[in-house]
Each structure stands twice: as structure tokens, then as C-alpha cells.
Image (cartoon, coloured by chain):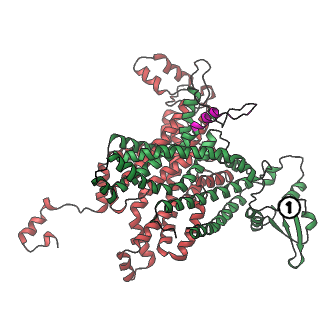
Amino acid sequence: MSRYVFRRLLQAIPTLLGVSVISFVLVYNSPGDPILTRTFDPSITQETREILRRQLGLDQHWSLQYIGWLTGIALRRGDVVDEFTRSEVKCSFVAGLNTTFCDNGGGILRGNLGTSIATNQAVWDRLVERMPATFELGVSALLVSLLLGVPLGVLSAVYQGSFFDNFVRVMAVIGNALPAFWFGLMLIFIFGVVLGWLPTGGRQTVSLTNEFDWVDRLRHLILPTIILAFGGIAGISRFMRTETLEVVRTDYIRTAKAKGIAASRVWFIHALRNALIPLMTILGPAILGVLTGAVITETIFSWPGMGRMTFSAAVQRDYPTVLGAVMFFALLTILGNLLSDILYGIGDPRVRLS
Amino acid sequence: MTVAQADSPALASLAAGAQFQRKPRTYWSMALQTLRRDVVTVVALGFLLIMAILSLLAPVVSGGIGVGPNDTNPENAFQQPYLGPYIQWRLGQDPITAADMLGKSGGVVHWLGTDQLGRDQFVRILYGGRISLGIAFAAAALTLIFGVSVGTIAGFFGGVVDDAIMWFINTLISIPGIYLLIIVTAIFKPNPVTLTLFLGLLGWFGTARLIRGNVFKVRELDFVLAAHSVGARTIRIMLQHVIPNALPIIIVNAAIDIGVLILVESALSFLGLGVQPPTATWGSMLKRANNFLFLRDPETGAYVALHLLIGPGLLITLTVLALYLIGDGLRDALDPMMKNIR
């Protein structure tokens, strides 16, 4: 088991490197000048801009910039130690290679995602700041979709062909086709604007004291959770229905029935437990789904999470933030997939992890 | 040996009679038969066809009504749908409202009302359908071309080729797709053509994996071995034997893919990253409507932008729903070869 985990983690390294190259090249080739967006002040001369460009290494070939972003080590031809040495940057000149190596202590390999162009904060700090909001929303959406999706799917298998079964299946198809942003707007309109029962957006009511109010937080959480969860409910109920129907055809269920065990016990003890195992494989895709849905949901509800931050960073061309967020999301996705494979192996010992 | 070739001449002549002649039942004709009996799928196909025709005829409809998709009339902003008052006028219940609305709009009939600039909502929805459906169908065609060719190559050759392709796909799949699209569209402000390209280029990974899995199965089958042994070239085996075998999967996948692409395109437009205004798409119309969600008529207190919110959203939902149902129906119709996709 530990060998399997170790190998999977090793395999993740080339994948993450690939993600870094692809996203870096994508962003690097973008039209528009990051220096211009950063120094909007018209009093700054062209000369200053050039110096800034040189200091940030933006005048270099993309591969050198990529290495700088990855390792935090910048390479410069010739002896330019004096020009580039600053309090946080250490430079040394290697005469044999006629190259100056500058180490700014950063680089994503050392866990430093760089500095945001828009806010001058460390990208990691920005992510950490937004993380609780996204996790709060994601976890509650995941919980709701499991708590509703699993029983709906199992019951629809129990009463296969009944009105209830057909209803759940139709709702699942509609749930898949419903655009989240439109459904969200409709709910905001009905519950937020017309009825005025729930807040139309945000994570909490803005107040001077800013104290933590349980009820207020929950009220803000309801609508975004519904929007983020309804796709999951549809998917999980469909999945559970198929799985349960498959388990019901097995021999051990027939045996259990033949022994005269009560139907409810057969369904919910024997069938459900085995049908739940494949649900483990959903965990990875579920994390991906929450991260994907987060962009739209957080944008509609002005939810201060990572999805909305990444979206606005992309619009503002804050490339370090975008790149850092993409790397972080890719890591989360890979870890989520690994975790669901491990859980599947634990749930079903017949699956050999190798 | 068929009956007609049987020993007895009497039997043979009987078998040649018209009442015993029927068309051969092929796989595709049987699938078509199943499909025709499937009411839900037929209705969904009909809806999609009507939407496609209406969108294609958008210029004709717009000419008939006498207003273009981008013709503004600020005097007449947020006019409510004419449809309701028109029916009441025909029924003789309310002779005033309809005439009043026509007077305000200068004689132009705004069946679904107007937006904040007084543009006709119905005509814009039709033009938006052109863009949304057009982009989704074209992008789906691209994902099919890339997905099928890359998936077939990976599955057929296996080994290093497969490893390299799968590494590439797994790498790109580990970035949540919507973020990739957001980055690309935020960086390169797209027009409909480039947006189609982006959606196509970033959307084929799932198809490729699906096809690859199928090709892995098919290439071990005897008829591929037979083709090899009679000296068929690799490219011929792929095109003649392997890809046709995946056709049912490809078709079902395409229907669902178009639906997903409509959702993605409208989400991007809703975020303001899709096709840029004033060109109407269903997503960008909703983005506009979002800005006026709270707007109320100062006199009556009614919400004036509701009709802008409902129309495009309902159409997206129904169109995507139709495509999913068609996908489901096709899956059932083409069943013998496939049980477990998606």
C-alpha cells in the first residue's frame, strides 16, 4: 500500500511539471504587457519601465523565465551582481560560465508561488485567505449532495420502475441540463429579491463589529450550497441507482433473501453497504466538480472564495496569481484522485492497488 | 444457404414471391426502428430541429418583424412581452394594453419584450441561438476529430505512443477545464471562431480516453487479426475496422458533448469572457439581465427585467435537455454494442 502511494506520488511529479509548463507557456504568450498594467501611473517614464522589466526578468527568453518561476533562480549573462543584488535577492557571478546566478528565495519548487501583480501580496497568502470560504462552500455542497443523492438513488433502485423512480430519474436529467448560473439567478430572484427570505450574496452580513454570527453565516450559505450541490445530487443519485441495481443481482443478495431476512435489512444492510464502495471513486471527480462549480457559484453569489479570485485575477491579467492558483488546483485534483483510489482499495479488498 | 437456393423448385419460386421479400435488417435500420418508437427522443429531436431552423432563419424572422438584433430604441426599454397583452386583445378582454404597447414601440411587435436598450428580445434570442448552437456544434465536431484520431492512435499503437499521449491528456485533465478556458478567453479576447477553436482544442480529452478504451478492446478481436493476416495496411485497419466499431460510442458521446459545450459556452459568456457584445448569445443576454435583477417599475413596483432572465435561461436548459435525452435515446437504440458509457 505505501509503495503504491509512493509510486502514485512519484507519477504526480511529471504531471505537475507538465501543468506548470503548459500554463506558463499559455500565459507567457498572452498579448498585453504586465508592466503596463502594473505601472498604470503615467508619470513613470519608459526608462523606469525598462528597468522594472529587466529586474523582473520579463525581457528574457520564456524558458529562462520559466526556470526562474520554477526555481527562484534567475540566470544573467555577464557579471551583473551589483545591478541585481537587493535585500531579498542574492547574486553571485560564476566566471567560468560567464553567468550571474541570482537567487530570490522563491520558486514554486520551494513552495513559493510568487507575488501577485495586482495586490503585491504573496500568491500563497491570497489563496490561504480565500481557502476557508471555498472549503466551507465545497464541503457543505458535497455533504448535501451525498446526503440527498445516496438515499434518492438507493430508493429509486428499490422502487425500480415506480413513479418515484421515474421522477428521480427525470429530475436527475433536468439537473444535469440546468445551467448553474441561471438557476442561481432564479433562486436569488425568488428567495432573495421577491420573498426576501435569504441574502442575495456574500458570506456574511457586513457590519462594523464583524463578529461571527452563526445564523447569519448559515443563511448566506443556503443558496450557494443548493447551486453547487444540485449537479452532484443528480450525478450521485444516478450513480447510486445503477450501483444498487447491480449489487441486487449478485448471489449473496439472493442468498440473504432466501434465508428470509426482512427486505429492508437486505436492502439497507447487505445491498447498500456494497453499493457504497464504488462511491469512493467519485471523491476525486467530486473535488474537481466543486472547484469547477466554485467559479460560477462564487461569482454569482459574490462568495469570497478561490474560484472568484482566480477568475478576477485572470481578467486583471494578474498572471502570478493565476498560475499559482492553477498549480494549486492541479495538486488538489491529483491528490483527490489518489485519495479516492486508496479509499476504494480499502473499501473493496479485492481491488489490488499496484 | 437461403430458401431461394433450396432444392425444391416449388419452394424456390414460392420464396421469390413478393410476400416473402423483405428488406434486409441491418444494425442501423434496427437502431432507427427503436429510435422511431422512442417518443421522448423523437420529441427532443423535434425541439432541437425547430430551434436549429428558427436560428438559421433568424434574419428572415427579424426582417418579418421589422427590427434587427442590435436596433436600439432607448425610449422603449424594458417593454414587457407583447404576447400576453396580444392574446388578451384577441380575446377582447383588454383592448388597451396591446395597442398602447404598439404605440410605444412605433408599431414594432416585441413578442418577448425588449431589453435595457429597447432591443427586441425575441430576435436577439434567435440570433443568440445561432451563435450558441453554431459554436457548440462546430466545437463538438472539433472535439470529435481530435478525440477520435488521438484516441485511436493511442489505443491502436499502445506502448510509448500511448504513454506519451496519456501523460499529455492526464496533465491537462488535472487542471479543472473551466479554469483553462477562463485563462485562455481572458487572455485572448475571443470572437466566435476563436472561441470555437478554444472549446474544441480544450474539450477532446474525455472523448480521446473513451475511444482509446474501446480501441484497446477492438484491436484484440479476430477480425482485426484477419485483416492483418491478409496484409491490410495499418491505416486501412484503423479506418475500416477499428473506427466504425466505435461509431455508436462516438455518436452518443457527440450528442452529450454538444449539450455540455452549450453549457460551457453560455457560462463563459455569462462571465463576460465569451463572444463580446453587442453580439447576442444566450449567456451574455443572461449576464445583462443579471444587472437589472433588482430593477422595479417606479409606479407599479413590478420587476421589469424578469422576461430578460427567463427566456434565454429556459432555452439553454431545454436545448441541453433535448441533447441529453437524444444521447440517452441513441444509447438505447444502439445498445447491443454498448452498455456502460457515462
What tint does the image give chain A? green
Residue at (37% x, 83% y) in the render: B229
The quadrant the N terminus of chain A occupies is: bottom right
User: Which of the two residues, B80 or B264, is positioned nearer the viewer here?
Assistant: B264
Is residue A214 located in the magenta-colored stretch of the structure? yes
Q: Quadrant of residue A74?
A: bottom right
Residue at (43% x, 72% y) in the render: B238
Residue lying at the far right of the rendered structure = A82
Give the amino acid type for the residue marked by disc 1 in the picture: Arg
Residue A280 locus on image (x, y percent) = 50, 56
Residue A56 lies left or right of residue A147; in this view the side is right
Residue A323 locus on image (x, y percent) = 70, 57
User: Which of the two residues, A296 or B134, is positioned nearer the viewer here?
Assistant: A296
Residue B2 lies left or right of residue A241; in this view the side is left
Q: Is residue B14 above or below residue B198?
A: below
Res. B52 visible in picture = no
Where disc 1 sits, the SS reads: helix
Assess disc 1: are there few (<14), some (14-19) or many (≥20) residues with their C-alpha within 10 Å of its C-alpha. Answer: few
Q: Chain of mark 1?
A: A
Residue B207 locus on image (x, y percent) = 49, 61
Tell me the residue that label 1 is attached to: A54
User: Which of the two residues, B324 or B279, is positioned nearer the viewer here?
Assistant: B324
Magenta span of residues: A207-223
Res. B146 visible in picture = yes
User: Which of the two residues, B108 or B3, is positioned nearer the viewer here?
Assistant: B3
Q: Is residue A32 above or below residue B122?
A: below
Q: Is residue B213 above or below residue B91?
A: below
Residue A291 locus on image (x, y percent) = 60, 50
Q: Which chain is red?
A: B
